[in-house]
Image (spheres, helix red, strand yellow):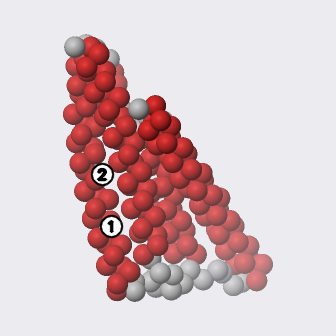
Amino acid sequence: MKRFSGIVERLGRFLDNIAACCVALTMAVVVVNVLLRALFNRPLLGTIEYVNILTAVTIGLALAYCAFCNGQIAVDFVMEKLPARTQAVSDVITGILALGFWGLAASYMLDYSHEMLNSGLVSSTAQIPLYPVSYLITFGLLALCLVLLQRISVSLRKVRNLA
């Protein structure tokens, strides 16, 4: 199980590094747009589209590592008062519900990505094909599902050990 956890962590960290590059690229696009507008009175066409696409990719790829590091908001002050076994059972239940939700989201995103590919959907100004963005977000959601699966297995082991 430690091997699976290590693989999930490395994948999440890799995707998070790509997301960090997207943030840097977003900042660069905005700065270039401001400089072109101020110095040459010619803004970068499609800046909003570039920023929107990079932001979507950033969020989609950063989800898995954020979940792996427990970076999300959690309501621990209530759970801390419960017995350890109840906490572990609650973690299993919420993990299964989250896995179901994010698994469905990934499935729908995959279908939507196929539709984008088949229809040839592009952004309005820059004419960027949007299906690669959608596939990247889908991949990020699948990585999040792996993290949730890993966390469920850890919680199940806790429930078994506390029985």
The residue drawn where x is 56% and y is 55% is: 19
- Quarter-wise, where is residue 160 in the image? top left
Q: Label 2 is placed on what type of residue?
A: Trp
Relative height, residue 147 to residue 107 (above, below):
above
Residue 102 is marked as 2
- Outermost right residue: 39
Above or below 41: residue 54:
above
Give the amino acid type for the residue marked by disc 1 in the picture: Leu
Regarding mark 2 in the picture, which secondary structure is present there?
A: helix
Does the image show residue 60?
yes
Give residue 130's position: percent from left, percent from top.
Answer: 44, 77
Residue at the image point whose x is 27% and y is 65% from the top: 108
Q: Name the residue that disc number 1 marks.
A: 110
Name which quarter of the figure residue 107 lies in. bottom left
State left or right for residue 78 relative to residue 62: left
Q: Is residue 113 above or below residue 1?
A: below
